[in-house]
Image: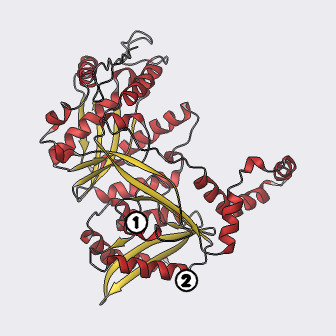
Amino acid sequence: MTDSEGFIALRASWTALWSRLDRPHVFSSFDWCWSAWSLVARPRGCRLRLLCGRLDGRLVLIWPMMEDGNVLRMLSSETLEYRDVLVESSAHATRWVEDAWTHVTAATCATTYLFQNLRLPSVLRTRLAEVPRARQFAGGWCPLVSLERFPDWDAYAKTLPKSLMSDQRRQWKRLRAAHPGVAFRVVDAAESIEPVMDWICRHKIAWSQSRGTRVWFNAADIFAMLKAVARAALPDGRLVLATLSDGDATMSAGWGYACGSEFLFHAFAYDEAYATYSPSRLFQEGLLRHCFDRGFRTFDFMPGQEAYKRIWATDYVRQESYLGTFNWRGALLLQLSATKASDAPPALHRAYRALPRPWRNVLYRGLRSYRLVNRALNLKPIPKPDPAPCSTSALLDVVREERRLASKPTTVSGEPAGSRETASIDATRTPSGESLSASS
């Protein structure tokens, strides 16, 4: 299927198949994929490629894809998300995916394929692992909390370093002294979604600018897509959007999605003016407590090596990415993409800069396939993490970040800069038995 009209006509049968999946993630839902296509991929010039499989008229397989230049990719929002083929649970599911792969290789106009963030177990990953030309790249481990291993928050908290929980209590006390009404609040009103997400966007961009990086929220089309999905997920309880706030003062906010018995933590931000109170850690505690109350079995932090994720994690789940070619032109693209743009002769760089801007824009778009593959080849795999949860290194990384932010000249609640107590953690007891001391 290659047209938007056919895509939108699939809504009912897509949703019916999605509801029958063993793991119905929000990222494979109709609302997510349609919003990703209509608000991000189509305006950016991608070509829709939806592969559907039916058995006796019933939809049993959907493979959402798009051609981006000469590269065949999973249909996505360009954010971190899990991707896979939607296939009905059946003894024949593996054969259906093999048939789908055979059709793709015969029908595609792309020269190369790039399938990222396949969360294991994955029916597509099982097939790609058997393809001779498929090359695994990047991939890694996603931290998660196995909530099902604990009867409640208190039992889980006892497994965390005592120094961490002591500092949590200390920071709650300090924050409540300055803001007596502060609390973790779930947003359940449709009219509040956009203001809270706008707040997250502003502070996420400010956070990235202070570090000289870019985040999804810098792209207006991606942020519009995220808000559209959030609005669609609220009525049936899949959206979990929350704040750490006191009246009009918001210290931290974030959101994720309920996917059956799993919770997927998608994004959050905090106001750096309150950094001395460790608002992100307090928000995460509130969110974990909420997930225990709702009876989720797992809390998935999604891909990423951020230290704050490792503080809370009890386990890790594997995700893999694959890159390969369909023909000799794809093999040539792969070979060229292995060369860094910075290695090009200086005369070529000067010639490019001398071109009129419209020509440069055309050339830049023409090199889209090269840039996609080159970026993928330069991604570093995430090493297997320390099996001990709440690692010492993660605690130290978070403390250093809080110390850096607390030293910035900001003002909170009328306190002059430099007068506030800074965050400290004395992690003298860790699950691995190491001893350390870190304070500021």
Q: Give the percent coordinates (x, y) of residue 131.
A: 50, 71
Q: Is residue 156 above or below residue 366?
A: above
Task: Name the residue beneath numbered marker 2.
Answer: 106
Residue 244 sits in which quadrant?
top left
Q: Nearer the viewer, residue 205 or 430?
A: 430
Q: Nearer the viewer, residue 17 or 39?
A: 17
**Residue at left 24%, top 20%?**
166
Under circle 1, the secondary element is loop
Task: Name the residue beneath numbered marker 1.
Answer: 84
The colour scheme used to paint the residues is: secondary structure
Q: Give the percent coordinates (x, y) of residue 429.
A: 27, 22
Mark toward the start of the polypeptide (1 vs 2)? 1
Considering every residue shown, the one lying at the far top of the view is: 419
Q: Is any part of residue 248 visible from this angle?
A: no
Q: Is residue 298 above or below residue 388?
A: below
Kind of residue sitting beneath label 2 = Ala
Q: Give the percent coordinates (x, y) of residue 224.
A: 46, 54
Kind of residue sitting beneath label 1 = Asp
